Image (cartoon, rainbow, N blue to C red):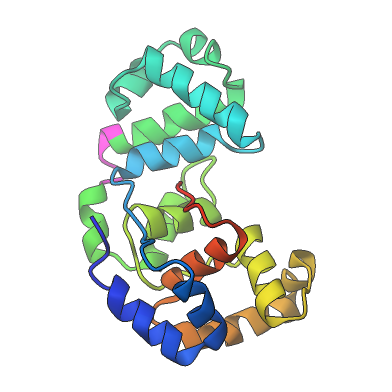
Amino acid sequence: MNPPYWNRARRTLATRDRRLAAIIARHPGAVLRSRGEPFVTLARSIVGQQISVRAADTIWQRLGARLPELTPAALTAAPVRSLRACGLSARKVEYLQDLAEHFRSGRIDPAHFGTMTDEAIIAELTEIRGIGRWTVEMLLIFTLMRPDVLPLDDIGLLRAIGRQYFDDESPDSLKTRDGRRRVVELAGTWQPWRSVATWYLWRSLDPLPVEY
């Protein structure tokens, strides 16, 4: 399903920002697509922490082979030894089963997300071990398709902004207090479509859409 706001956001951003207009023009058919399931998205983010994309994909495939239905109940009930055999560290197994228990018990109910603000969802989910703000921001963009998320800790976004707007300034420089202030000020022009601007800035680095 395509976001209902996508075409309107594209037109608005292209009108306001000539650099984004050029990037948008190079990707006429590309669009954000929802991953659909919050629990699976969060579980996959835990699997991928601090390892390469290739290693994460291998472990995820092994996990899927052992648990064809990756539900909170199935993950909670899975023996630790079985999960470790997929290549998961002991800590990641703890994180995954804690995440699963939050969903299985109803402490986290995705049905409520539709009535919650972005910041409320971030606050609720970052209470879970192994889930940080960036992970929830990826959930907001790629699964819930919220239109106005600005992931200030995303290295790809900062790299793209540095190249496009700040004379190839490094991501590390833009992570400082002053750097963040300038990024937030720049992104004010993109509101209320900062997720869309972010997505197109990612495309300026890699034309293939990324998924989380």
State the residue at coordinates (78%, 74%): 169
Q: Position of residue 192 (x, y in %)?
A: 38, 81
- Chief secondary structure of the magenta portion: loop
The residue drawn where x is 37% and y is 31% is 100
Residue 154's place in the image compared with 150, above or below, is: above
Q: Identify the residue shown where x is 54% and y is 23%.
A: 58
Residue 177 to residue 118: above or below:
below
Q: Position of residue 131 (x, y in %)?
A: 51, 45
| Residue 145 within the magenta-colored segment of the rendering | no
Q: Is residue 143 visible?
A: yes
- Where's residue 22, x and y in %? 52, 79
Residue 59, above or below 131:
above
Q: Quadrant of the N terminus?
A: bottom left
Residue in view at x 51 percent, y 8 percent? 81
The number of numbered badges drawn on the structure is 0
145 shown above or below 197? above
The one nearer the camera, 52 or 153, is 52
Q: Quadrant of residue 29?
A: bottom left
- The answer to whether one can see residue 93 in this image is no
Which one is in front, 109 or 13? 13
Q: Nearer the viewer, residue 9 or 124?
A: 9
18 horizontally vs 64: left or right: right
User: Would you identify the image quadrant in which residue 151 lies?
Assistant: bottom right
Q: Position of residue 170 (x, y in %)?
A: 78, 68
Which stretch did the figure color magenta? 104-109
Which of 201/178 is in front? 201
Q: Left of 138 or right of it: where is 12?
A: left
In the orientation shown, which residue stands out farthest toward the bottom? Answer: 16
